[in-house]
Image: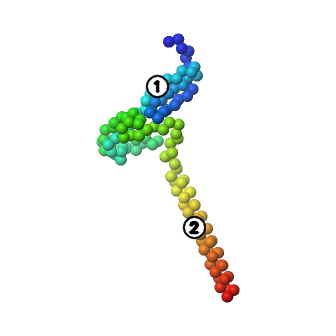
Amino acid sequence: DGSPVGNLTAVEIDGQGYITATYDTGFVRTIYQVPLIDVPNPNGLISLSNQAYQVSPQSGSFFLWDAGDGPTGAIVGFAREGSTTDVAGELTNLIQTQRAYSSNAKVIQTVDEMLQETTNIKR
């Protein structure tokens, strides 16, 4: 069409799952719509590496939906996946915090007992 060849400079995904490509020539084009998938039994999916899943006979056949339609929900553009939390690290931090709290509670209890003894000595 006579347009110069451009280099891809940005890719965006909107709430309906449309992927938009922006080129250095100023040309913007919608290149794909990401479908959302629904299965009758999500617990029957086979877990693969890198948070990927595979359909199995136990999960049932999959159904494709546009974002916002059907039971699948929506896509949140410009959002970071938050479910990649390091559970082992967070549990370790929780245990350390709980132990520090218990130690501080024991110190307060000991100081309280010492003050009680001091009060009893004065009498």
Query: Residue 1: x, y in percent?
Result: 50, 12
Kind of element beneath mark 1: strand
Describe residue 52's horizontal placement relative to residue 62 as left or right.
right
Residue nearest the observer in this picture, 89 or 120: 120
Type of the residue with mark 2: Ser
Report the residue marked by disc 2: 102
Kind of element beneath mark 2: helix
Query: Residue 27: x, y in percent?
Result: 54, 21
Describe residue 63's horizontal placement relative to residue 112 as left or right.
left
Residue drawn at x 33%, y 45% is: 41
Residue drawn at x 38%, y 36% is: 69
Residue nearest the observer in this picture, 7 or 54: 7
**Quadrant location of the C terminus in the rendered image:** bottom right
Q: Eyeballing the image, is 66 above or below 47?
A: above
Residue drawn at x 55%, y 23% is: 23
Query: Residue 48: x, y in percent?
Result: 42, 42
The crowd level at tag 1 (other Cα within 10 Å; few <14, some 14-19, many 20+) is: few
Q: Residue furthest right?
A: 122
Report the residue marked by disc 1: 31
Type of the residue with mark 1: Ile
Q: Eyeballing the image, is 114 above or below 22?
A: below
Q: CA gap, disc 1 to disc 2?
A: 57 Å
Quarter of the image holding residue 9? top right
The crowd level at tag 2 (other Cα within 10 Å; few <14, some 14-19, many 20+) is: few
Query: Residue 21: x, y in percent?
Result: 51, 26
Residue 46's disc is none
Is residue 7 among the parts visible in the rendering?
Answer: no
Quarter of the image holding residue 52? top left
Asked which colour scheme the image uses, the reply is: rainbow
> Of the residues under marks 1 and 2, which one precedes in the sequence?
1
Residue drawn at x 65%, y 85% is: 120
Is residue 20 among the parts visible in the rendering?
Answer: yes
